[in-house]
Amino acid sequence: MNEFRFNAAQRVRPMEGLTACGDAVVDVREGNWSLFAVIDALGHGPDAEKSAKAAFHAATQARGQALEQVFEAVHRSLPGLRGVVMSALLAQGESLTFAGVGNVEIFSPEGVARPVSMAGTLGGAAYRFRSFVFPLKAGQRWVMASDGIRAREAGALLPKLNAEPAEATAEQLMKSVTRPNDDASVLVLDVETNA
């Protein structure tokens, strides 16, 4: 039985003046396998939304697979569509694996080295995949955000929100540090002990 549970909060909104959104957040849990990801399609508007939806569908259909296979499924889901960038966390057993392609920001818990994303775009030419494995620990908070969130300001704000629940933190980030001229998405993931 998994000794951890995950409290995840997400927010997604299109850029000002649009209803179509090219960002998507994945939260899929099946038994001992939990996938959390933020997807950001290139550009914005209806074409970006099509790509984000295709990538979201591919990621959710890859349930139970290793993180590298999830990225490959997303990559292959985009023929004729705009590319996407994505960061993802896969929790399985007592470990958490991170991988990122492109500029979706990852904020790691205090005391945990920040993993790096690979340059590139899924859905286009070849991309590079590299993963980082961390031990899962109760009390960890991981945050992923598309570039519609101002990373430097988010990084300064997050320590002040440590005591806030995931939902309140996601809401505050969306309210305080977004760019009006881009789609924005954020996922706040708190690791808790399974009671």
Image (cartoon, rainbow, N blue to C red):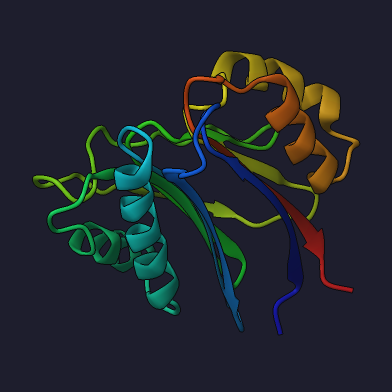
Measured along the vertical axis of the image, is residue 75 above or below residue 14? below
Measured along the vertical axis of the image, is residue 12 above or below residue 68? above
Which of the pair 119/21 is nearer the observer?
Answer: 21
Where residue 68 sits, quadrant-wise, is bottom left
Please identify the quadrant where the C terminus is shown: bottom right
Which of the pair 149/81 is nearer the observer?
Answer: 81
Where residue 164 sits, quadrant-wise, is top right
Q: Residue at x 34, y 59 (%)?
A: 55
The spot of residue 32 in percent (x, y) is 60, 79
Q: Residue at x 87, y 45 (%)?
A: 165
The spot of residue 14 in percent (x, y) is 53, 37
The spot of residue 152 in percent (x, y) is 58, 14
Q: Residue at x 83, y 29 (%)?
A: 161
Please, which residue is most extreme toward the left here?
125
Which of the pair 156/53 is nearer the observer?
Answer: 53
Q: Is residue 152 visible?
A: yes
The spot of residue 124 in percent (x, y) is 13, 46
Q: Is residue 85 visible?
A: no
- Numbered circles on residues, count: 0
In this rendering, would 38 be left or right of 50? Answer: right
Q: Residue at x 51, y 27 (%)?
A: 148
In this rendering, would 118 be left or right of 17? Answer: left
Please identify the quadrant where the N terminus is shown: bottom right
Which of the pair 2/78 is nearer the observer?
Answer: 78
